């Protein structure tokens, strides 16, 4: 199986969504509600489209780094 097949699989979508949900919960715990909301949205994207969720999470991390 290639990388594209792995990123498109249901299993990778679930794993990506789960890790993003954990990141969102940690952001919410730290009081970063805006980042938590963005990460919850990214988790929804990651569940449906794994690659899109990963890109969204990377953009959110970039946002956190730049602010």
Image (spheres, rainbow, N blue to C red):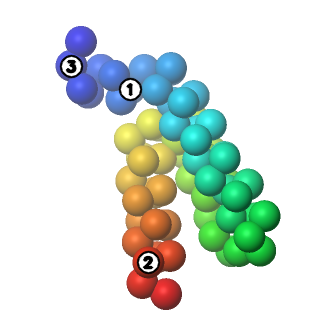
| Residue at the spot 77% in from the left edge and 74% down from the top edge | 31
Count every numbered label the image shows and give the total.
3
Q: Residue furthest left?
A: 2
- Mark 1: secondary structure: loop
The residue carrying pointer 2 sits among few (fewer than 14), some (14 to 19) or many (20 or more) residues within 10 Å by Cα, namely few
Q: CA distance from mark 2 to mark 1?
A: 28 Å
Asked if residue 33 can be seen in this view, the reply is: no
Position of the N terminus, as image quadrant, is: top left
Asked if residue 29 can be seen in this view, the reply is: yes
Position above or below: 37 against 14: below
Image location of residue 35, percent across then percent down: 63, 70
Q: Nearer the viewer, mark 3 or mark 2?
A: 2
Q: Residue furthest bottom?
A: 67
Image location of residue 65, percent across then percent down: 44, 78
Residue 48 picture quarter: top right
Q: Which residue bears the numbered disc 2?
A: 65
Q: CA distance from mark 3 to mark 2?
A: 32 Å
- Residue 66 numbered tag: none
Image location of residue 13, percent across then percent down: 51, 30
Position above or below: 5 against 46: above
Circles 3 and 1, Cβ within 8 Å, touching? The answer is no
Q: Is residue 31 left or right of residue 61?
A: right
- Residue 2 numbered tag: 3
Mark 3 vs 1, N-terminal side: 3
Mark 2 vs 1, N-terminal side: 1
Judging depth in this view, the residue of 25 and 51 nearest the camera is 25
| Residue at the spot 58% in from the left edge and 41% down from the top edge | 19
| Residue at the spot 41% in from the left edge and 59% down from the top edge | 58
Q: Which residue bears the numbered disc 1?
A: 8
Circles 2 and 1, Cβ within 8 Å, touching? The answer is no
Q: Is residue 33 left or right of residue 5?
A: right
The residue carrying pointer 3 sits among few (fewer than 14), some (14 to 19) or many (20 or more) residues within 10 Å by Cα, namely few
């Amino acid at each position: 199986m290639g990388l594209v097949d792995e990123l498109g699989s249901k299993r990778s979508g679930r794993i990506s969504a789960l890790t993003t949900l954990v990141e969102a919960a940690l952001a919410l715990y730290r009081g970063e509600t805006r980042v938590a909301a963005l990460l919850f949205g990214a988790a929804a994207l990651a569940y449906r489209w794994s690659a899109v969720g990963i890109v969204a999470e990377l953009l959110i991390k970039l946002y956190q780094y730049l602010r």
